[in-house]
Image (spheres, helix red, strand yellow):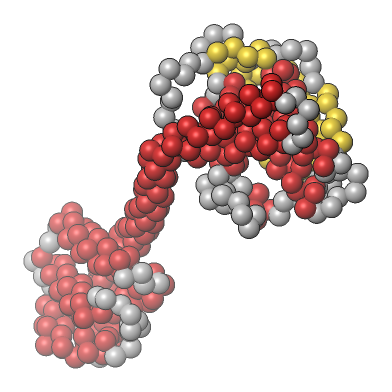
């Protein structure tokens, strides 16, 4: 049963409904870019109507209707990308306007206390539900946008993988023929100049083609994992890159432990080593580092993993770039594809390992951690 004071207040608010809404509308903050600005008045009236009917409901019913209204409005605010501070300010303006009308009612504040407490309860709960749901809605929007970006990016990689898979053999068939004829020329004319250089350049081209092929993330038919020796692989790579090492006057230092047996794809691991070492040579040459040095070290961790580090004394990788060097299509080279380190990371992860980079003003270190495996991964 409503008290006489409550009846008077309800009558007052009912009669002054339009004036109250207009006064509130004249002071609130509305963004010109708000796609829901036409609904702000409607939302204000909805909250006002809850206040008018609050005495007729139980607390449970009142909370349910407040929560429903708050969620609907906060969803709009999140989609409109409106500052939550503006929203809270506008809601509290409605509370202030209602108080100003209460002060004109000619009633004692002591008599109004129960109604004031009820009004505060409605506004406080509305703001709590609205702000909480606003935060959840904004996080959901950000998550959906991130998923869309990731999906679009993945589609791009998938398309590239499909494209490379379709024409890779068209590249490799003539390349294989050329390499075969080079071997015949070597046999017939062992003293002919430049054959070794041509053969080396063809190997580099074959390596670059393989990088694109790996983007498809498909296992080659008939390709099987095998055991291979890490130290032997390192020596093969250094021999392969010897012309570039010699040309750049780069000093190679090795501190590697006794032979380590790994299990996986030796050709892919070879590409990782070639890519990282060749990048180091290229950086040292490009920046004309005096006394250029590349150090290759390895050690055993807990008898389960080998830690291989490849460092150079070139310039520091800026901190803002170090977080993105393993992302696809990231490159600082004018003619770079931005796939080298991305492919390296993919290969290492495929072998259940980790690839990290640490760069300081004095040294840049790429560290590879791989399981020592004598059985399938």
| Residue pictured at 25% horizontal, 60% vertical | 71
Q: Quadrant of the N terminus?
A: bottom left
| Residue pictured at 62% horizontal, 36% vertical | 202
Compared across the picture, whether 110 is left or right of 312 comes to left
Q: Is residue 345 above or below residue 72?
A: above
Compared across the picture, whether 38 is left or right of 304 comes to left
Q: Farthest residue toward the top?
A: 374
Residue 143: give x, y in percent of width and height: 38, 52
Q: Is residue 291 above or below residue 25?
A: above
Q: Is residue 119 above or below residue 260?
A: below
Compared across the picture, whether 6 is left or right of 354 comes to left
Q: From this viewpoint, is residue 305 visible?
A: yes
Residue 295: give x, y in percent of width and height: 82, 33
Q: From this viewpoint, is residue 132 visible?
A: no
Q: Farthest residue toward the front?
A: 188
Q: Quadrant of residue 302?
A: top right
15 or 158: which is nearer to us?
A: 158
147 or 343: which is nearer to us?
A: 343
322 or 94: which is nearer to us?
A: 322
Residue 273: give x, y in percent of width and height: 67, 31
Q: Quadrant of residue 15?
A: bottom left
| Residue pictured at 90% horizontal, 49% vertical | 290
Q: Is residue 292 above or below residue 123?
A: above
Residue 367: give x, y in percent of width and height: 70, 33
| Residue pictured at 83% horizontal, 24% vertical | 255
Q: Farthest residue toward the left?
A: 1
């Amino acid at each position: 049963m409503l008290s006489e004071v409550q009846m008077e207040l309800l009558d007052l608010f009912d009669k002054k409904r339009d004036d109250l809404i207009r006064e509130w509308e004249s002071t609130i903050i509305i963004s010109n870019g708000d796609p829901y600005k036409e609904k702000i008045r409607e939302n204000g009236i909805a909250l006002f109507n809850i206040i008018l009917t609050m005495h007729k409901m139980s607390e449970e019913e009142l909370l349910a209707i407040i929560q429903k209204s708050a969620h609907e409005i906060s969803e709009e605010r999140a989609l409109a990308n409106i500052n939550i501070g503006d929203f809270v300010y506008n809601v509290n303006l409605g509370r202030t306007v209602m108080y100003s009308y209460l002060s004109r009612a000619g009633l004692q504040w002591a008599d109004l206390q129960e109604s004031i407490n009820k009004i505060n309860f409605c506004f406080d709960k509305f703001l709590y539900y609205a702000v909480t749901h606003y935060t959840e809605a904004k996080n959901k929007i950000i998550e959906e946008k991130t998923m869309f970006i990731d999906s679009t990016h993945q589609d791009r990689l998938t398309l590239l993988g499909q494209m490379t898979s379709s024409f890779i053999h068209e590249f490799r068939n003539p390349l294989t023929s050329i390499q075969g004829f080079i071997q015949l020329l070597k046999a017939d004319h062992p003293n002919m100049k430049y054959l070794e250089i041509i053969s080396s350049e063809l190997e580099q081209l074959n390596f670059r083609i393989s990088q694109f092929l790996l983007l498809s993330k498909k296992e080659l038919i008939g390709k099987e994992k095998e055991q291979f020796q890490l130290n032997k692989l390192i020596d093969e790579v250094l021999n392969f890159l010897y012309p570039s090492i010699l040309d750049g006057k780069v000093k190679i230092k090795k501190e590697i432990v006794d032979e380590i047996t790994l299990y996986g794809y030796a050709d892919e691991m070879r590409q990782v080593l070639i890519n990282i070492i060749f990048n180091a040579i290229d950086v040292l040459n490009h920046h004309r580092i005096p006394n250029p040095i590349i150090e290759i070290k390895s050690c055993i961790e807990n008898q389960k993993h080998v830690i291989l580090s490849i460092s150079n004394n070139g310039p520091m990788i800026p901190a803002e770039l170090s977080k993105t060097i393993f992302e696809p299509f990231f490159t600082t080279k004018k003619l770079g594809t931005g796939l080298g380190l991305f492919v390296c990371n993919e290969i290492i992860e495929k072998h259940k390992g980790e690839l990290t980079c640490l760069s300081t003003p004095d040294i840049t270190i790429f560290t590879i951690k791989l399981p020592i495996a004598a059985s399938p991964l």
